Amino acid sequence: MTEENKDEVKNVVSISDIGPCKKKISVEIPEEKIRAKLEEDYKELRREAAIPGFRKGKSPMRLLEKRFGKDISEQVKVRLLADATDAAIKDNKIDMIGSEPNVDIESINLPESGPMKFDFEVEVRPEFTLPALDGIKVEKPKAEVTDAQIDEELTELRKGAGLWKPVDGATVESGDQIIANVKVTVEGGESDASNEGTAIFVREKGVVAGVPVQELDKLLIGAKQGDVRTTVVEVPKTFYNEKYRDKKVTLDITVEDVKKLEIAEMNGEFFARFGVEDEKGLRSSIREHAENMLERQSRYAMAEDIRKYLLENTTFDLPGDVVADQSARLLQRQYINMVMRGTEREKVEAQMEELRTSSEEQAKEQLKYFFIMDKIADEFKIEVDDAEVNSHIAQVAIQRGRRPEKMREDMIKDGSLAQFTIQVREEKCIEKILEKAEISEVDAEKKPAKKAAAKKTTKKAEDKEDSAEKPAKKAAKKKED
């Protein structure tokens, strides 16, 4: 049989849907193809094998089969499975999520006669139709910076420069910080080691010893030094940490210290850390940046309108396990999004804690939006080259007072550069859509009511951190690198 004829022997492939984003692929490799591959390997072996008593190329086939048959069969099986799996995916244009399919090679045997049959499952990108992308109605909020806003931001700067001081006999209040020993007990398992000296901020949502806690403030308010507060947390199925995912976790929190924030005084030392001489200079810096930030927030608000439109007008299902597997990646994308906005490291970490407590529904929504934007990028043939990525990194680095090359190096180390590239491509998609959108201006006060419900908490937090990010504050960080 010639090489050309061998190539004409095709595998029999059938594909069936077994759930949202999941397909079962069944493959049958014809006996003719198996025999041809075995003959090919035995011929090669016969040419190269050195069997005592026989010249190279003259060893009896029965002797070769007896001595090397098991190894040859295993090698042929592995190659046939690999080739057949790869061909089934490529020939049928299976758009997989994640890495290569997992075929249980050990459970499959090369038959003595007849075809070799096997099947495997893959997770695939959802199939759906995009809504119309022209003429989307978008509202651009218009606003001005008020003296009251500047007063508020000045107070935030003083809080940021303040010190947390323990107060003997104090009662825990909202906004305080406590130092506690935390005992973590996972349902069905032994207690984890005690987490001593854990700093906990008393707010509505938080993470205690790596566990997300809703209504944390209600749990802790009123406690004093030595008090123990206990709560049982039902961790979401989509939580990033598999150790706690979809389990009940008991937290025993023993209060060691209660700390109150003492905000910084506005003196020469305070102004110097922001690179200004006095309060007037600091207020001027706050106003300038706030005005620039309003324009940026307008762009984000319009992007949110587009996001809401796409989610409401695109329908497809996602299985729970796919959502769970993607949760860590989505958290990283949120992290990159905040970095791209120039958010300070401390605020990034605070927001990541809140994002980790997100509901399963929000995780699904985020994943759904990722697939929609990925398809839009393909539709518009939008790509991102290294020069664009480096340009965006440079912009963010300047905002954060860092060296671009150092920031890129750190992103390569922590594996976030690829996600940064995805985010840049997503922004290009939004800009493309905005070119043909119907944009109308509205008062900024009216805009928030139109935002998607699942994004309200996150968006509000992002807007707050954006408005608090001032050039004067960044000036204090320019020595970071």
Image (cartoon, rainbow, N blue to C red):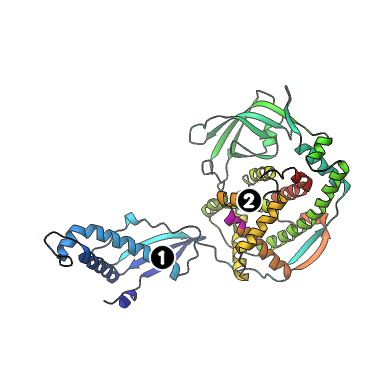
Q: Which residue is mark 2?
A: 407
Please provide percent x and percent y for residue 15. 43, 66
Q: Residue at x 52, y 32 (%)?
A: 192
- In the rendered structure, which amino acid carries the disc numbered 2? Met
Q: Which residue is rendered at x = 72% and y = 29% of the image? A: 259
Q: Position of residue 135 (x, y in %)?
A: 73, 71
Which mark, by number, is residue 86? 1
Vertical position of residue 42 compared to residue 475: above or below: below
Position of residue 190 measured from the top left corner of the image (x, y, whole percent): 48, 32
Return the residue nearer the eye: 284 or 40: 284
Kind of residue sitting beneath label 1: Asp
Which residue lies at the image location 55% right of the left edge and 33% below the top edge?
A: 184
Q: Is residue 383 visible?
A: yes
**In which quadrant will I find the N terminus?**
bottom left
Residue 469, relative to residue 119: is it above or below? above
What span is in magenta? Answer: 416-420
Q: Is residue 101 magenta?
A: no
Question: In this rendering, is residue 223 above or below 41?
Answer: above
**Left or right position of 304 against 322:** right
